[in-house]
Amino acid sequence: MQLFFVSFNFICRFFDYVDAFLCPSEFMRNMAIEFGFPAYKMIQIPYLTRLNNIHPRFGGDNYGLFFGRLVPEKGVDILLEALRDTDIPFFIVGEGPSKNHLVELANALDLKKVVF
């Protein structure tokens, strides 16, 4: 439980710089709000969502950030594939059993603006 609070405190330092936190379930969204995350920044996008009506914004000095455990079920490999034809700086922050594979994949895809 202590690790959770360390991670939560780390994330809290970045509230003002984050446009939205994506939650894979309503339960996770409600728990985050209960812990003090601002409700208007908590967006639920359940697994297997059709993304036809979601339009990302890019511009300025913006960049993308993935913050989480690097395991297959998180889909970071799919994220890297999606970044292949973009010029978006992207930071991947986390540890886990998939980290080496994901670093190798990013290198194989020649993703020069992806930083682990």
Image (tube, helix red, strand yellow):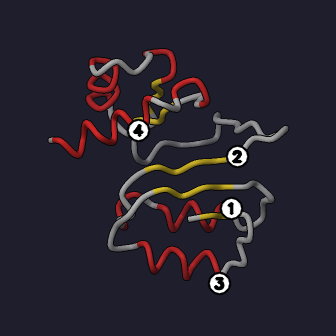
Instruction: Name the residue beneath numbered marker 4.
Output: 10
* Quadrant assignment for the N terminus: top left
Q: Residue 16 lies in what quarter of the image?
A: top right
1 or 2: mark nearer the eye: 2
Residue 94 in percent (x, y) is at 42, 58
- Give the SS element for disc 2: loop
Q: Which residue is mark 2?
A: 63
Residue at 45 percent of width and 25 percent of height: 42
Q: Earlier in the sequence, mark 3 or mark 4?
A: 4
Amino acid at dot 2: Tyr
Q: Amino acid at mark 4?
A: Phe
Tell me where residue 116 appears, x and y as whole percent: 55, 65
Q: Residues within 10 Å of mark 1 (few under 14, many from 20)?
A: some
- The residue pinned by badge 1 equals 83
The crowd level at tag 2 (other Cα within 10 Å; few <14, some 14-19, many 20+) is: some
Query: Do callouts 3 and 2 mark residues in contact (Cβ within 8 Å)?
Result: no
Q: Earlier in the sequence, mark 2 or mark 4?
A: 4
User: What residue does disc 3 label?
Assistant: 108
* Left or right of 44, for residue 33: left
Circle 1 SS class: loop
Sequence-wise, the earlier of marks 4 and 1 is 4
Question: Nearer the viewer's eye, disc 3 or disc 4?
Answer: 4
Q: Amino acid at mark 3?
A: Ala
